[in-house]
Amino acid sequence: MKMSIFRYFKTSPEVIRLAVMMYVRFPLSLRNVEDLLHERGIDICHETVRFWWNRFGPTFAAEIRKKRIAQMRGFGQYQWHLDEVFVKINGETHYLWRAVDHEGEVLESYVTKTRNKRAALKFLRKAMKRYGSPEFIVTDRLRSYKAAMREIGNESRQVTKRWANNRAENSHLPLRRRERAMLKFRRMRSLQKFASVHSSVYNLFNLERHFYSRENFKRNRHAALSEWRQLGAA
C-alpha cells in the first residue's frame, strides 16, 4: 500500500494543496497567502507556506509532469520553441532556458551561469531525454543553439525565422510576474526549483480561455482543479 506524503502532517491535505497552489500559481507573496488563508479561517505563518511549497511543490510538479508525458506519447512532438532569458541572482547574471511545445506547454526549464554551447547542449539533452526528439526546433539566432544541434545531429531541424519564436518569449511572462512578487531570487538552486514547479502548475491551469466558449472553459477549469486536488493522494 502506498504511503501518503501527508502522513506526518496534522494539517489537512486540502489546506496544504490550496496554499501551494495559491503561492505558485498566482503572483502572491508568502504573506499574501497567509492573509488570504486567514480570511478563510486558516491561521498559519508565512514560513509554513514557504515550507509547504518547498516540501510538496516538487512532488506535485513531478506528478503533473508524469501525467502530461503519458498523455503526449503517441501524438508526437511536432515543434518546440527554445529561448533563454536573463535573470539576476544577487546581482549576477544567469540564464533561464525554456522549451515550449507548439501548444504553449512548458516542457523544460533549466538555469545556467552561461549561455554557450555547453549550456545549450546540456539543456537540449535534458529536454530530449524526457520528451523525445521533435520534428522542428524553433530558436533565435544564438550561435550556441546551432553548435549544440550540430553535435546532436539535428541541425537540419532548426528554424530561425523572424517572429517564429514569439511563443517561447511570451512563456517567460508568467515567471517574470512571479519574480517581481518574490523580489527576485537569491540562489540559483531556488530559481531552478521554483521554475520547474511553476512551469508544471502553469501547464495544468493554462486553459487558454480565449479559445473556448464559457461552458468549455468552466468544464476545463473544473477538470484542472479536480486533478490538482488528487495530487499526493495515497
Image (cartoon, rainbow, N blue to C red):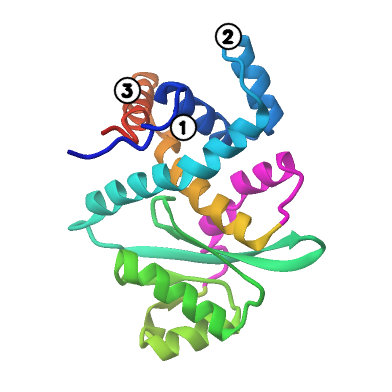
Quarter occupied by residue 59:
top left
The answer to whether residue 171 shows anywhere in this view is no
Task: Please provide the residue range marked out in magenta.
Answer: 161-186
Name the residue carrying label 1.
210
Name the residue carrying label 3.
219
Q: Amino acid at mark 3?
A: Arg
Q: Report if the CB atoms under discs 1 and 2 are less than 8 Å apart.
A: no
Q: Nearer the viewer, residue 161 or 194?
A: 194
The span from disc 1 to disc 2 (Cα, nearest Å) is 34 Å
Residue that appears at 82% across and 63% down:
91
Q: Nearer the viewer, residue 124 or 183?
A: 183
How dense is the environment of label 1, judged by Cα within 10 Å: few (below 14), some, or many (20 and up)? few
Residue that appears at 57% across and 72% down:
140
Name the residue carrying label 2.
41
Q: Nearer the viewer, mark 2 or mark 3?
A: 2
Label disc, if present, on residue 130 of the rendered structure: none
Would you place residue 151 above or below residue 172 in this image?
A: below
Question: Along the polypeptide, which appears first: circle 2 or circle 3?
Answer: 2
Would you place residue 214 above or below residue 52 in this image?
A: above
> SS class of the residue under badge 3?
helix
In the rendered structure, the answer to whether residue 50 lies left or right of residue 234 reads: right
The span from disc 1 to disc 3 (Cα, nearest Å) is 14 Å
In the rendered structure, the answer to whether residue 84 lies left or right of residue 205 reads: right
Residue 221: percent from the left, percent from the top?
38, 26
Residue that appears at 48% across and 85% down:
148
Residue that appears at 57% across and 83% down:
144
Residue 177: percent from the left, percent from the top?
67, 42
Question: Along the polypeptide, which appears first: circle 1 or circle 2?
Answer: 2
How dense is the environment of label 2, judged by Cα within 10 Å: few (below 14), some, or many (20 and up)? few
The span from disc 2 to disc 3 (Cα, nearest Å) is 29 Å
How dense is the environment of label 3, judged by Cα within 10 Å: few (below 14), some, or many (20 and up)? few
Q: Nearer the viewer, residue 79 or 130?
A: 130
